[in-house]
Image: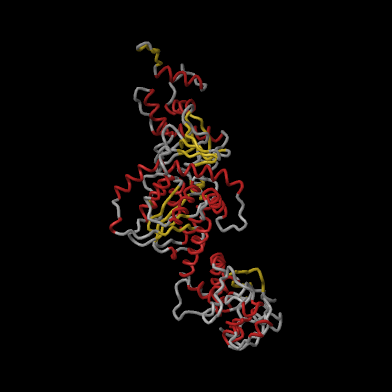
Amino acid sequence: MTTHVNGTTRTSSADLARKLLENNGVDPDKKGPSQASLLAALARERYELFMSDDGRPYGIPVGGPNIALPLRGKAGLRSQLARIFADTHHGTVPSQSALADAMTVLEGVAAMANPRTPQLRVARHDDRIIVDLGTTDGRCVAIGPDGWQRLGASPVVFRRSGAMKPLPEPVRDGDGLAQLRELLNITDDGFRLLVAWLVAAFIPDLPHPILTFRGEQGTGKSWSAAMVIGIVDPSGAPKRTAPRDLKSWAVQAFNSWAICLDNVSIVPDWLSDALCRAVTGDGIVDRALYTDDDVVVLEFRRVLAMTTIDAGALAGDLAERLLTIELQLIPDHKRREEAELNRAYADAHSAILASLFDLLAQVLKALPKVTLTERPRMADFARVLAAVDNVTGWHTLDSYRATAAGAVADVLDGEPFAQAVVDLVDKAGPDGVTLTASQLLEAVETPDKLPKKWPKDSTRAGGQLKRLAPALRTIGIEVDDSQRGPKPKKQRLYCLTASPERRCETAFPASPQASKPSVTCGNRGDASEGASASPHPAEGDADPRTASPHATPSDLHKRERGDAGTAGNAISYLLSGDPTPTPRCTECDTPLADFLVATGETTHPGCAPTLTARS
């Protein structure tokens, strides 16, 4: 039946239901359709159903914003269908069983469609990056090499979560970066590095280092971290406590593009591994709801931040993925109230986004031309930093390398076994040491009271050395475990050597009696130049004047660069005061390390199966 109100023709809910049934092959003249049938017909009429790559069913409103609604959940298709049904049936509420039956049918329909992947907050579309503003009408911002623009509808399918809040529309209103600078108490280098990290946070297809705000109490770590995360991905809970288990962490990470863990002091091993996987891309398998044997996969790569006082408590592999920003102590006369800061941030948010998007557009234009000759662990992020430097003239890549090395050094300070290994290698000379795990455990200096992390046997020692190898390389100690000992045991050998730069900086400090000005490792001279040689040894060399107190000026001219009997054995000269070369292995004729000489050994550990004594 149709009615006419003020010249407008309206179709009754009964006629609408009849039409829906006819369109879906149901005879309306037979026994009245069930609620489940009506719900399924409504959904197929109004939503485009599909299954995501991870096995989750979604529906997109036909003719509406490009936002994927999950079939279940408070903000999902189930609740939307219940509302539509009530609106079209004079307020009649569908039963829970009817909704459940309808969902089962709709999941089957979604499984037959081509799979799609709904994105969260940011997505790549051709040569542009699409940022979802999180509004109900689906507005977004598209950033490309030629600039950015606001769009009324997204070309990419996005999904939403209850943890998300809308982003303000970017508006060019002065210098947004200068306004952001006024809200932070960090150094200029730290601020530039933070800006580069924020630019990279809007690029979805690369690993992002974990932004770490470090400082003592009263430096504003928590507020600064919440503000920075809010710039990228506003949330009702921008700061989170450490999750209690892997499942709770997976749920948090799946539903937020950017996450901040606040006041981190101790990171358990499982969470440290989970954070590392979230940086590079992770997938966690979980049992599907209402099933016994079906599973779903939570896939995510996230932008992470955390606040801490002591980053040295973190594991080495996690420390390599940090970008540390040191916060300065705020004097009492400069401290601002939080309400004032919140107002200033809210007023500046739109301008900050506009300035960041301007810089991101320039970075996207410069990136294809950027090539790195040396790539650190987070190589993709480092390339973005190089593009930022190319555009702005900053030196964020150098700052990042320095902060990464500092974080790893802090971690090694908290590893007693690593410190013992470092001391052993520093004393061993340019040839380093080659030992089995059991020999290494015997060779290092053991504390009277073993620390908690000290390996209890050779198996644990080898495993810990393997885990520490990337951190040791960062400070200039190379770890090679590819060699095997002689038969019949063929035990794994660990070859540990210090780089020439590390030997220059740690083993051979400049002589205070040197008549010539000190030459740094960056501009060191050649030892073959005699009296004019640098008090720091050249790469691969040791300074004869420092190594041997008995050396004469004529000796300096006789010793050639890289000679194993002179510069290569300078540690022996330093320890013994005797210019006699270090004894060589009777099997392979390579110089023996000092701790082997001290024990009376005549063969290299790679040639002899065991050590007879500790150094």
250 sits to left or right of 560:
left
The residue located at (56%, 64%) in the rendering is 470
Instruction: Say how many tags the image has.
Output: 0
The residue located at (54%, 77%) in the rendering is 510
Image quadrant where one finds the N terminus: top left
Q: Nearer the viewer, residue 73 or 344?
A: 344
Residue 175: percent from the left, percent from the top? 42, 44
521 sits to left or right of 17:
right
Quick check: can you spot residue 606? yes
274 sits to left or right of 366:
left
The residue located at (56%, 33%) in the rendering is 113
Q: Nearer the viewer, residue 84 or 610?
A: 610
- Up-down: is 548 above or below 135? below
Residue 4: percent from the left, percent from the top? 37, 11
Residue 615: percent from the left, percent from the top? 56, 83
Q: Nearer the viewer, residue 45 or 132?
A: 132
Q: Nearer the viewer, residue 53 or 67?
A: 67
